[in-house]
């Protein structure tokens, strides 16, 4: 047997995993966002509700590990299938999930913070400034290349408004000044983009079924904004309380739409439910802890339980797709390219 025949034999013996990486969804980066977000929610519950601390830390470890795994797989995908990755980045919906990569880095830094603050600070720095670059590129594209209205979806909030995550994590890592700057960027872009998205959703056309779970992303900016203001100001002041109120009305509207959400077939866009639900749970615990009587803290448990159930259900559906092989098959275009 010659050395030249060994690679050919290995290719015949190895399952066709690597070629299938061409279809690895970029949107899967929403998964570590959801899992890390839930881990941070349980970490907050350990501080405010006397919940077991191990639950939050275990979820944070799982979320950070998932982010690292996806980063490695997409790096390999970019080497082996650069055209497929480039097509995702150019897509009006899938391309927005590049922002989930940098948000995931910031959330992973939050997970790492209590254990390795130096490494966490470096990771947060990369994630925060990486997301600033993502936001600038996305904004430039919107300003210079008009889009069809069908391509304007809530997923645009991920690359544009994700800067608001930076202070929610960065203040505890010793970066309050940068945190205020990133908060300003995220708040400005949220206030600019939100009425455009709301007008598009009200006037139509309706979102296609695979994208309807992304309506939950509308909950994230006010919820994360409330958390960020608590961290930046050191108080649970009226501005943070007001943002939580804005998040509350969005959460109630989504709850009233629950029956329609449950009728939808499972798709990976269901991860769009997870991070907003976790962020709203954190903001709710913070506001009840600061402003409500002690007995009212019990109201935080159903919100935390709902966020946990959402993450568990979506993770189960994703694992089923992975086991069946459907996770690495081509997806149908949810919106036309433009």
Image (cartoon, grey):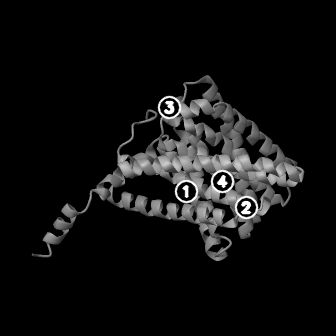
The answer to whether residue 67 is above or below residue 160 is below
Name the residue beneath numbered marker 4.
163
Q: Is residue 322 left or right of residue 151?
A: left
For the residues labelled 1 and 4, the Cα–Cα distance comes to 17 Å
Q: Secondary structure at mark 3?
A: helix
Which residue does the image show at 25% across and 62% down from the upper left? 14
For the residues labelled 1 and 2, the Cα–Cα distance comes to 22 Å
Nearer-N-terminus badge (3/2): 2
Q: Position of residue 331 (x, y in %)?
A: 39, 41
Q: Is residue 48 left or right of residue 219?
A: right
Nearer-N-terminus badge (1/2): 1
Q: Position of residue 281 (x, y in %)?
A: 71, 50
Which residue does the image show at 85% across and 48% down from the upper left? 296
The answer to whether residue 123 is above or below residue 284 is below
Name the residue beneath numbered marker 3.
209
Name the residue beneath numbered marker 2.
51
Asked if the residue under mark 4 is in contact with the one under mark 1, i.e. CB atoms within 8 Å, the reply is no
For the residues labelled 3 and 2, the Cα–Cα distance comes to 37 Å
């Amino acid at each position: 047997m010659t050395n030249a025949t060994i690679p050919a034999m290995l290719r015949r013996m190895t399952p066709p995993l690597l070629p299938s990486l061409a279809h690895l969804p970029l949107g899967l980066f929403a998964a570590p966002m959801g899992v890390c977000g839930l881990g941070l929610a349980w970490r907050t519950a350990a501080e405010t509700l006397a919940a077991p601390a191990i639950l939050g830390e275990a979820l944070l470890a799982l979320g950070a590990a998932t982010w690292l795994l996806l980063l490695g797989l997409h790096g390999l995908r970019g080497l082996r299938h650069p055209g497929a990755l480039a097509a995702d980045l150019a897509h009006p919906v899938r391309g927005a999930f590049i922002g989930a990569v940098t948000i995931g880095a910031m959330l992973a830094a939050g997970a790492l913070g209590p254990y390795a603050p130096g490494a966490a600070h470096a990771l947060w720095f990369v994630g925060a400034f990486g997301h600033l670059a993502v936001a600038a590129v996305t904004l430039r594209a919107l300003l210079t290349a008009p889009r069809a209205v069908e391509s304007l979806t809530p997923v645009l909030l991920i690359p544009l408004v994700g800067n608001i995550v930076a202070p929610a994590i960065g203040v505890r890592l010793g970066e309050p000044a940068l945190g205020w700057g990133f908060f300003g960027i995220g708040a400005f872009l949220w206030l600019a983009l939100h009425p455009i998205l709301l007008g598009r959703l009200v006037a139509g056309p309706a979102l296609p079924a695979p994208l309807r779970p992304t309506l939950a992303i509308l909950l994230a900016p006010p919820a994360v904004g409330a958390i960020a203001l608590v961290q930046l100001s050191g108080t649970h002041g009226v501005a943070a309380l007001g943002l939580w109120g804005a998040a509350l009305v969005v959460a109630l509207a989504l709850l009233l739409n629950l029956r329609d959400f449950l009728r939808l077939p499972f798709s990976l866009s269901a991860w769009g439910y997870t991070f907003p639900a976790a962020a709203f749970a954190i903001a709710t615990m913070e506001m009840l802890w600061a402003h409500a009587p002690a007995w009212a803290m019990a109201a935080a448990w159903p919100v935390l339980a709902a966020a946990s159930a959402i993450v568990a259900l979506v993770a189960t559906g994703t694992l089923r797709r992975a086991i069946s092989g459907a996770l690495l098959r081509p997806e149908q275009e949810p919106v036309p390219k433009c």
